[in-house]
Image (cartoon, rainbow, N blue to C red):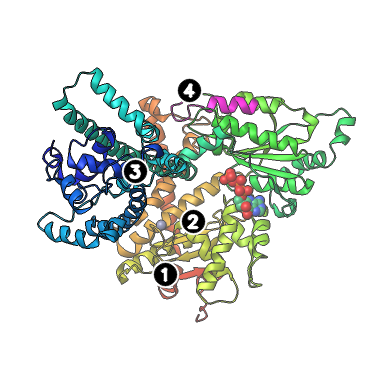
Amino acid sequence: MFSLSSTVQPQVTVPLSHLINAFHSPKKTPVSVSASISQNQHRDVVSEHEAPTNEPVLNLRDLGLSELKVGQIDQLVDSLLPGFYKDKNVSSHWHTSHVSAQSFFENKYGCLDMFSTLRSSCLYRQHSRTLKRICSDLQYWPVFIQSRGFKTLKSRTRRLQSTSERLAETQHTAPSFVKGFLLRDRGSDVESLDKLMKTKNIPEAHQDAFKTGFAEGFLKAQALTQKTNDSLRRTRLIVFILLVVGIYGLLKNPFLSVRFRTTTGLDSAVDPVQMKNVTFEHVKGVEEAKQELQEVVEFLKNPQKFTVLGGKLPKGILLVGPPGTGKTLLARAVAGEADVPFYYASGSEFDEMFVGVGASRIRNLFREAKANAPCVIFIDELDSVGGKRIESPMHPYSRQTINQLLAEMDGFKPNEGVIIIGATNFPEALDNALIRPGRFDMQVTVPRPDVKGRTEILKWYLNKIKFDQSVDPEIIARGTVGFSGAELENLVNQAALKAAVDGKEMVTMKELEFSKDKILMGPERRSVEIDNKNKTITAYHESGHAIIAYYTKDAMPINKATIMPRGPTLGHVSLLPENDRWNETRAQLLAQMDVSMGGRVAEELIFGSDHITTGASSDFDNATKIAKRMVTKFGMSEKLGVMTYSDTGKLSPETQSAIEQEIRILLRDSYERAKHILKTHAKEHKNLAEALLTYETLDAKEIQIVLEGKKLEVR
Ligand SMILES: Nc1ncnc2c1ncn2[C@@H]1O[C@H](COP(=O)(O)OP(=O)(O)OP(=O)(O)O)[C@@H](O)[C@H]1O
Ligand SMILES: [Zn+2]
């Protein structure tokens, strides 16, 4: 009645015809060849009682016979196979083998094998000769029908033999309405479609078109469903991958992981560290601090002893001092001495940009500590968590963190056995609420070590390396005023490295001096090529400083003179105070100024006033500073009297000029004194300069030998 190939795409011919046929009523006389034949083909999906109805089980559409006119095929088959249609039993048998053979061929070659269909059937077995003839007659018909792309659909529909299979299949692939369509009794489907056509009053002529439309819709829906399923699966996969990557990123990214861990409760407090190996023995040069902390150790060892007497020990101890002076070391030693757990936290760890993170970390830390009392909680850089509660865009949640800290400190009794030790370099920056009694109410100062302390620290760290017996830690200690424990440790370490680089077996004074100068003035610049003229100027300049220092009564003793460039300098003379100077006399200050002037005076005397250099600028800076402080701070000027002048910019012009004049006089006098000494000791000056040009560096003893006019031993 209608040509499928003319209404649908050639590739959809096969499945579409199947469907079309499926909608045809079995009772109806075939309206088209393809339709009538395929009715039987669909018996594999229809219920048993319908199976033996009538018509051949061959889909002529599949065989490329769709162009046959109605009735032609019937006539053909009838003439070739008389009584075939009446043979009910045959069809079901051959039909099954037809399906499997065909799907095998199909799977292998991707197209339908019409002849195998015929051959495999009992039709072929019974009437082989007749069939061969038909086949030769049919040669001009299209034999192979490309059916790739529909195998799945076909095989699925064909394989739906048992109800259970149907269920399994349809559950996976077909959308619900298709499932319904496939599972329902085919008879009722057909009936309902017919009914539908009747109720809609679809004229006979349009009924096939209606069915085709229906079938097309069905196929499109199925293709769409398949597509949707695929994309759904893809989306699920992508979502899963994104989820995995997201969680991984969350944990790895420090920025996000903080938030993630704290909000999920994974962010537990720091683990305690047993500090048995660190004791007060390891902390040198801070005797007073150690003494004060000794009672805390006693308390931690035996809290009951203190409670019996009703005494209250501070909950919090604040260690105040410059960086590297051993505050952390002391806190560890407290825990180590008492043999209790030590919880370390740095204030900056609580300084989070997320609301509540810092506070929750404080909570975690205290919860852990309380569960393990007696113990020590050490909060380094306390100022970064306990700074004054100001509204700062840099630390938006600092208020919460510090409030939490205060709450936690109030939250346990003084004798519970938890001691909080905080360390800071800026006690003045701390919030007042934090340093009131009941919180960090005990302050222990940890200052930079004095010469005795430095000697102890140097000895302690020297004992950890191999050093020569000639090493005198005190000399190094004297030359390292203002060094912290950490810097002294570094000095010894650098000396050991230098000795190793130079292939020495032991560390000598030379390496220690070397590393001291390196820390103080920067590394040597051995690669710098300095011409002889400049070297000579430097040698005389430095010798000038050394001569003044040597011949001035109140000047500091000389330690070393060198013309080896280091950092920004071309050479230098180092002086050593015998002791740390707590106070300086007027004579000492003037001597310092004179020594500073020595460099320029030497240049002027030796090379003439036209050849003085810029090398003396830092010397003048130094001398001017001393003179200014003498006049404005120390009350050491007769003219200006015992008065301090802090902000000289706000003073009257007269006073300002008076101060300036006094400074000028002090400097000029100093210059003259230096000139006098150098003129007097011109010979020694020359000898020393030449020795420096020869040896580059001279230590205190060598300088003395040269100045005494003796010959230096050849090194
Ligand atoms: N008095 C000291 N005795 C022995 N070693 C010290 C001393 N002071 C510092 N050190 C050494 O320096 C290292 C650093 O010192 P520490 O961390 O204790 O200083 P800090 O005062 O806590 O510094 P910061 O204020 O920068 O935290 C110590 O581990 C130790 O090796
Ligand atoms: Zn100088």
Residue position marked by numbered label 1 in the rendering: 689
Which residue lies under the disc numbered 2?
520
Task: Assess disc 1: are there few (<14), some (14-19) or many (≥20) residues with their C-alpha within 10 Å of its C-alpha.
Answer: many
Most extreme residue toward the front is: 82
Residue sitting at x 71%, y 54%: 282
The CA distance from mark 4 to mark 3 is 74 Å
Within 10 angstroms of label 2, few (less than 14), some, or many (20 or more) residues?
some
Give the image location of residue 651, x and y in percent: 40, 26
Q: Nearer the viewer, mark 4 or mark 3?
A: 3
Q: Which residue is mark 3?
A: 157
Contact check, label 3 and label 2, Cβ < 8 Å: no
Q: Which residues are magenta?
A: 391-406
Residue 258 position (above or below residue 98)? above
**Which residue is disc 4 drawn over?**
391
The crowding category of the residue bearing disc 3, from other C-alpha atoms within 10 Å (few below 14, some 14 to 19, many at least 20), is many
- Tell me the residue at 72%/50% (across/down): 275
Q: Is residue 396 magenta?
A: yes
> In this rendering, which labeled residue sits more in front, label 1 or label 4?
4
Q: Nearer the viewer, residue 476 or 359?
A: 359
